[in-house]
Image (cartoon, rainbow, N blue to C red):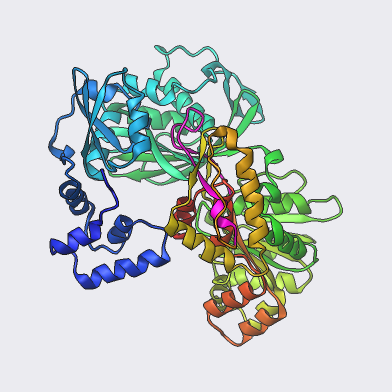
Amino acid sequence: MNSSRSILQYLVNKGLVSPQDANKVEVEKTKSSQTEEQIIKNLKMADEKTIIQAKSELFNIPYIDLMTYEVPEQSLSEINIDSLRRYNAVPFSHVENIVKVAMQDPFDVQAIEALETKYPAGTKLEIYIADEMGINSILDRRVGENMSSEVTEALEDVQVPVADITEQVGDEYVGNMENMDLKSAPVARIVNSILQYGVKTSSSDIHVEPLEGRLRVRFRINGLMTERLSLPKHLASAVVSRIKILARLKIDEKRIPLDGRLQLKIGDQKIDVRVSTIPSIHGEKVVMRLLANDLESISLETTGLRGSAYQKVLDAMSVTNGIILVTGPTGSGKTRTLAGALIRLNDPKVNIITLEDPVEIRVPGVTQVQVKADVGLTFAMGLRSILRQDPDIVMVGEIRDQETAQLAVQASLTGHLVLSTLHTNSSSAAIPRLLDMGIEAYLLASTLRCVIAQRLPRRVCKYCAEAHPVPPEVMKNIKETLLSIKNFDVVNYARKLAEASKNKEGEGVAIKAPDKDPTGLDQIYLYKGKGCDRCGGSGYKGRTGIFEVLHVTEKIGRMMMEDVLTSDVEKTAVEDGMITMIQDGYLKAIEGITTIEEVLRVSKD
């Protein structure tokens, strides 16, 4: 199969895409590392089914509509559901030694080779093409078929026995789960297993969701939602009630949202679990956020901050007054970065008070206050009270309104160091956001020290990472990105990366012959995880931060008072040496920490 033939030209020839739109795609290809197919879909010039059917005709690959096809149970049961999701594949027929497999990407040689290893020697795969909706429909149906098999499949890699999990009542951990019998307490065992699986997979959240015909359990692993369990609908009320009992919530109150918490101990690991319920048309939905009490792993260094960005943050923290902001969407790691800063600032000689909603990471020696809006303890009210508590350093969980913003500025003007978060997409966008909240430009210019913007791309699994040559179009993008970093020694950087690649020659990394590229970037590789047991077949394990740190200089301070555009502020910051999030992400992708795809995915937020 030759996948290089142009889908775009085929769609133009068929009259499905206009020549004008085709030109837009060609222009976008020069600016993006995305494939031609991705660009066509993103620009909404053709839907996925149209593209899939075009590929079927163009490359003479048979197409199958899985939405109308009944796949035999035996065909699906031969391969783990996680592997099928990873490869976007559905084996829909197995007759003698011939297996017919529907794939979204029939040119994914690695996926095909991986699937071949799942069958006995001599088995022949016949590849069909199918759209994503059809593939997901079959796999989702497989997930919801049988409770017993799904509990086993979803939790089979959990090594911690149920006897090792205890719940906390007050300040004591009570081992009342130790002697549970599956027949006497099946619902309790199911809930325990769900919690164990969440901890085992380092999930940040567990979603227990009643749907029309079943109870779906999803886990947010490495920032992405993944379904791992489906239970019969008649168990929904019992499972939710069990969780509410553990969280000390009223099990008979189902009309309004409820919030609670519980603490678990699995082995030696203590886990805080924040529980939130909300009534839906199919019953109560529960979300459990898992917060590991592992302060040793929390620091500014472990977030991914490094180099000049890290030093700028340290410089801002070294002064006794001013405002330090961390920006980004929900789930981008802002709380962990602030916790790392607090841990570094924490000292018996200073009084640190925080105001949070909720308190997620507990820091010994720091006074942490929980916002309770229902009784009037808002961010603004709490901040006013904190300033009467003789603080040196104040951390406000989020600046949400004008009053809180003005109080934060006032606190910094009166000699306090204030740390907080803001929901903006970039560091430079924080400035107009605060000005829009009514902060006077001259006050903001004199108090704002730095703004940290961040995202959390997934880490490449170090246990199954493989090096791959860089495609020419991606290499062009990498060069443009790295060469735009001010005072960055690309040649020396590329030389060090090439040396690192040579050290991995024994692991199957072919060393390329020197090229005439003066930057030396022709010698680098990009890394991807092929999928293994340690990462659940995803190729990713854990997450890392990518950052941009805007240091507020006198020049940027003057720009605030001149009401300049956000883009002008960012341009000036880059000229002053700021490394943007995209640049930081590309550097980490080239170093094998993450992937270009992950950097682009999270940077779109």
Residue toward you, 109 or 40:
109
Residue closer to the observer: 105 or 504: 504
Would you say residue 152 sits in the magenta stretch? Answer: no
**Vertical arrangement, residue 272 with respect to residue 431, above or below:** above
Most foreground residue, 115 or 287: 115
The magenta segment: 519-544
**Is-magenta flag for residue 542?**
yes
So how many labels did they put on this image?
0
Image quadrant for the N terminus? top left
* Quadrant of image for the C terminus: bottom left
Question: Residue at coordinates 16% horizontally, 39% vertically from top-left?
Answer: 64
Image quarter of residue 522 = bottom right
Rendered position, 201 above or below 436: above
Picture residue at 58% right of the left edge, 19% below the top: 164
- Identify the residue at horizontal 40%, vertical 22% (top origin): 187
Q: 48 or 398: which is nearer to us?
A: 48
Q: Is residue 147 left or right of residue 244?
A: left
* Residue 147 x/y as whole percent: 31, 23
Is residue 369 visible in the rendered structure shown here?
A: no
Relative to residue 113, is residue 403 depicted above or below?
Answer: below
* Residue 348, horizontal then vertical, whole percent: 85, 50
Identify the residue shown where x is 70% and y is 47%. Answer: 299
Q: Position of residue 512 (x, y in %)?
A: 54, 47
Q: Position of residue 328 (x, y in %)?
A: 54, 60
